[in-house]
Amino acid sequence: MQRKYRLQMGPAPSGGAAKFWNMASISEDEGEITLYGDVMSQQPTNWWTGEPEPGLYITPEGFVEDLAAVKDKARITVKLNSCGGDLYTGIAIHNALKALDGNVNVIVEGIAASAASVIMCAGDTVTVYPGSLIMIHGVSVMLWDSLNIQDMKQLMKGMDASERAVAEIYSGKTGLGIDTLRSMMTKETWMTGREALDKGFADIITEGEEDPDMSMSADRKSSMSTV
């Protein structure tokens, strides 16, 4: 019998949702992707009718195909607002965005938590506001099956490998060590936009038209203002 479980970073989405992302060609050189909602492994449907449930979600279904609208653009803006959800979906979307040839700027318009923080790290630049929220933590598993000791040991190995993979993604963005990041994940670390900038998860903080933007130096040891 096939074991039924879903590996995720964050609480399981409740109540279902309906597809919400948008990809648009802004100009010949610019594209825009909007990613709002829970990160889910597949489109939720009503048990009785089979119809899509209402709400907001981000799934892998059709995502790669929809990338065709922006894949040839030189500059791509990703507007992100998500509390996270399914880890494997988050990693897949991260990798799809990283594979784009153009420069990707991820803007955290609200929150990038859990699996959404993995998606966020696909940005060549990550832009935040002072009020943006970023959260990283360890993986969890939702189970609905009976398991023996060996099953649990195998599951724990998979969870550990998944956390190592996520820590590698975070390390590639921030330059922080794997052990440091896994400790942050274990503690469940919440960051404001400025704190994310200080730790290397963000590159630019936007504080308004009259205020200078803050960006990290190349060695990520200090922040600097840009006019």
Image (cartoon, rainbow, N blue to C red):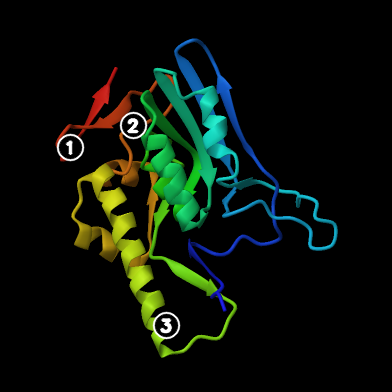
Which of pointers 3 and 1 indicates the residue nearer the eye? 3
Residue at far front of view? 1
Q: Which mark is residue 128?
A: none
Residue pictured at 44% horizontal, 24% vertical: 76
- The answer to whether residue 24 is above or below residue 49 is above
Disc 2 residue crowd, few under 14, some 14–19, many 20+, Cα 10 Å: many
Amino acid type indicated by mark 3: Met
Amino acid type indicated by mark 1: Ser
Q: Write down the quadrant of residue 124 in the picture.
A: top left
Q: CA distance from mark 3 to mark 1?
A: 44 Å
Q: Position of residue 117 (x, y in %)?
A: 42, 49
Q: Is residue 124 left or right of residue 17?
A: left
* Residue that badge 3 annotates: 152
* Residue that badge 2 annotates: 125
Q: Is residue 7 visible?
A: yes
Residue pictured at 25% horizontal, 25% vertical: 225
Which of pointers 1 and 2 indicates the residue nearer the eye? 2
Q: Earlier in the sequence, mark 3 or mark 2?
A: 2
Q: CA distance from mark 3 to mark 2?
A: 39 Å
Secondary structure type for disc 2: strand
> In front here: 210 or 156?
156
Residue at far top of view? 28
> In front here: 123 or 191?
123
Q: CA distance from mark 1 to mark 2?
A: 16 Å
Q: Are marks 3 and 2 in contact (CB under 8 Å)?
A: no
Total labels: the figure holds 3
* Residue that badge 1 annotates: 222
Q: Earlier in the sequence, mark 1 or mark 2?
A: 2
- The answer to whether residue 25 is above or below residue 44 is above
Which of pointers 3 and 2 indicates the residue nearer the eye? 3
Disc 1 residue crowd, few under 14, some 14–19, many 20+, Cα 10 Å: few
Residue pictured at 27% horizontal, 53% vertical: 168
